[in-house]
Amino acid sequence: MPRALTDYIKAREGYDYSHHGKADNPSTAFVPDDIVDRFCLLGPPERHLERLAELREIGADNFSVYLMHDAQDATLDAYASHVIGAL
């Protein structure tokens, strides 16, 4: 686990995980854009493929699809239809 992520998580206090991954999460300010940009894949399938290629180039050899959000089915469908086969 990257130290930048573990240090960030240790420094957080009072986060309400009952809203985690929800579109209307009132705690979105807890996760600044730089953390999202560094540790998440967002956007259309083409952007996921670009980011996964970047990560492969720096040595990543596995990833996880995180489905604790409002669009679980759409995410799985996009990976099944566009991402997995392209990898």
Image: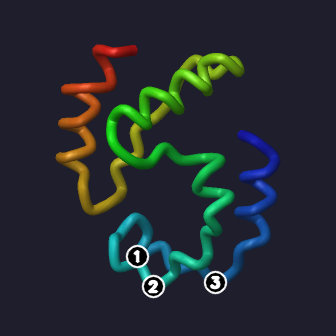
Residue ID at (24%, 36%):
78
Q: Nearer the viewer, residue 20 or 51?
A: 51
Q: Is residue 58 left or right of residue 19?
A: right
| Amino acid type assigned to the residue bearing label 3 in the image | Gly
Name above or below for residue 2 compared with residue 87.
below
**Callout 1: SS:** helix
Residue ID at (61%, 68%):
31
**How many residues crowd around disc 3 within 10 Å: few (fewer than 14), some, or many (20 or more)?**
few
Q: Nearer the viewer, residue 63 or 78?
A: 78
Quickly name the residue at label 1: 19
Locate residue 87: give its quadrant: top left
Which one is in front in this view, the residue at disc 2 or the one at disc 1? 2
Residue 72, x across and y down, in percent: 24, 50
**Callout 2: SS:** loop
**How many residues crowd around disc 2 within 10 Å: few (fewer than 14), some, or many (20 or more)?**
few
Quickly name the residue at label 3: 14
Name above or below for residue 73 compared with residue 86.
below
**How many residues crowd around disc 1 within 10 Å: few (fewer than 14), some, or many (20 or more)?**
some
Name above or below for residue 61 compared with residue 17.
above
